[in-house]
Image: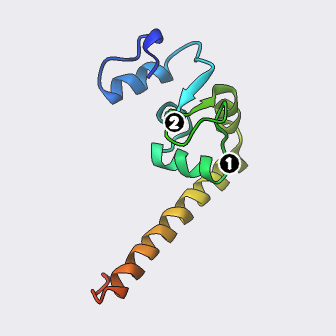
Amino acid sequence: MHKSLGIQSGTKAEQRWQLLNMRHLPGRLVYEEAGWLLGFSVDEISVLVNKKMLSTLGNPPQQARKYIATAEVMGRKQDEEWLDKASRMTRLHWASKNQRGKQQLNLRGQRSIP
């Protein structure tokens, strides 16, 4: 979290509350903060970045901490069509991933749960 803004300490709920109640947001957000503002989980933000529905700043290496521009997040937050598409994209991603997991279990000779 943004240590310079006094959001470093406290529980996740307290950190979320502090960010959502700031008068002036920082110029860039980590995935968790972007998720708080958009209503998505960190994993869903990752999916949206991988699907090119959100972009990271500065072309970071794979293992580096990634940031998203606050301006992009705030614009997306107001765009109902984008929110609908992003919600469908994350739902389809997890459905596909769950289906692949079931297929792998079946290939190993184990029963899948109906």
Label 1 Cα neighbours within 10 Å, binned few <14 / some 14-19 / many ≥20? some
Most extreme residue toward the bottom, as rendered? Answer: 109
Marks counted in the figure total 2
Mark 1 and mark 2 lie on one chain; the one further toward the N terminus is 2
Task: State the residue at coordinates (66%, 36%).
Answer: 59
Residue 60 drawn at (x, y percent) = 60, 35
Is 97 drawn above or below residue 2 in the view shown? below
Quarter of the picture containing the C terminus is bottom left
Task: State the residue at coordinates (41%, 82%).
Answer: 103
Quarter of the picture containing the N terminus is top left
Residue 111 drawn at (x, y percent) = 28, 87
Image quadrant where residue 69 sits: top right
SS type, badge 1: loop
Image quadrant where residue 104 sits: bottom left
Residue 28, disc: none
Residue 31, disc: 2
The amino acid type, in three-letter code, at marker 2 is: Tyr
Please indicate whether residue 12 sits to the left or right of residue 26 in the image: left
Label 2 Cα neighbours within 10 Å, binned few <14 / some 14-19 / many ≥20? many
Task: State the residue at coordinates (49%, 18%).
Answer: 21
SS type, badge 2: helix
Please indicate whether residue 85 sits to the left or right of residue 26 in the image: right
> Mark 1 near mark 2, Cβ–Cβ under 8 Å?
no
Residue 47 in view in this figure: yes
- Provide the residue designation for mark 1: 53
Residue 64 drawn at (x, y percent) = 51, 35
Is 104 drawn above or below residue 10 in the view shown? below
